[in-house]
Amino acid sequence: MADEAGSTAPASDAFQALGSESRMAVLRSLADDEPKTFSELFDASSEDTTAGFAYHLRQLTGLFVQKRDDERYELTYAGRAVVRAIPSGTYTESVDREDIGLDDDCPFCGETALAATVEDNVTRVFCRDCDSPVLRLSFPPSGYRGRDEADLAAAFDAHHRHRIEAFGDGVCPECGGVVTARLRPVEPVESDDEASTDEDHVPIQAAFDCETCGSSLRCPVSLTVLSHPAVVAFYHDHGVDITSRPLWNVGSEWRERRISRDPWCLGIRTRLDDEELHLYVARDGRVVDARRQSVTDRETESEETNDASEDGTTVDGAAA
């Protein structure tokens, strides 16, 4: 589909047009999606004269408000976005919260000691026992309202599952722009030791970046495949709902290991009972193959020996 031609206003003009309470009142008056006449908008305003009100309305028209053929006014797409942002607190609220207890085991030490804190709308999950950081992700201010600790944890988890899925589909969850995906080492390793710089020995993460707004996400690759049909079916067949496990601990059975350089491929393995699921992920984050395999006693013993050299999957360092 070809790009549609359209108009683009300078960002400074758009924000300047919002710099008046009278203009914000106009947007709120139109928030119910019911077109209104000039008189109806004026009556709902605090302006003393129609001339003064008309000036404010002109500053909004075109960018945030449009005049219909029947002489009534309605919000544009940008106007609706601003109206939604006002009650959500996106630009006006900063949320801070003390420790929130989470009823989940730490993926590092195994103790049920996970907690979350919120500072300036950013939630940090960590372990009180071993002090390991688990994840750090933002959450809209409105998401913290009206929820107890259990509901907040569930909402936070659902919100970021959807974000990961959208990024994985190549669509930015913030602006709808094109997303590039790439698997890469968690962080560059500077060393003269060739073995320590070998990617085979460095944990791999999925890196998503929006080409339009710059929104980004870094997370373990295993988190990007949780909604893959092969994964959902595998867990369902073993009586487990994978969606019931929060992002901060999806299970200790997950393993990741780079298995090929040419073509580049990351292997992800998860095991339940006497069966394994193997996923093969290309460098651009696509799952190119998925296979199930029964585990014999001999294979089990061999895999347990090799586990020590494979990277376990946690959400340590997940960030957006």
Image (cartoon, rainbow, N blue to C red):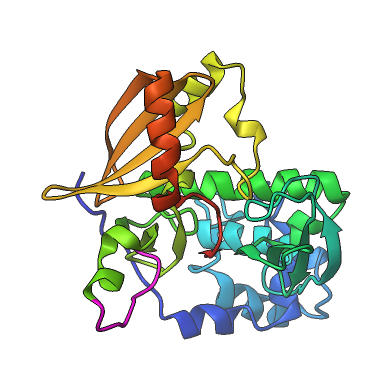
The single residue placed furthest to the left in the displayed view is 262
Q: In the picture provided, is 273 more to the left or to the right than 287?
A: right
In reply to whether residue 1 is colored magenta, the answer given is: no
Residue 184 in view here: no
Q: Position of residue 52 (x, y in %)?
A: 71, 82
Q: Position of residue 184 (x, y in %)?
A: 31, 62
Between 217 and 298, which is closer to the camera in this rendering? Answer: 298
Secondary structure character of the magenta stretch overall: loop
Q: Residue at x 69, y 66 (%)?
A: 124
Q: Residue at x 45, y 49 (%)?
A: 308
From the viewer's perspective, is residue 204 above or below residue 70?
A: below
From the viewer's perspective, is residue 38 above or below residue 52?
A: above
Q: Residue at x 54, y 20 (%)?
A: 273
Q: In the picture provided, is 6 more to the left or to the right than 167?
A: left
Between 1 and 282, which is closer to the camera in this rendering? Answer: 282
Q: Position of residue 120 (x, y in %)?
A: 72, 75
The N terminus lies in quadrant: top left
Between 53 and 75, which is closer to the camera in this rendering? Answer: 75
Q: Residue at x 62, y 25 (%)?
A: 241
From the viewer's perspective, is residue 229 above or below residue 285?
A: above
Q: Quadrant of residue 201?
A: bottom left
Q: Position of residue 139 (x, y in %)?
A: 67, 60
Region rendered in magenta: 185-193
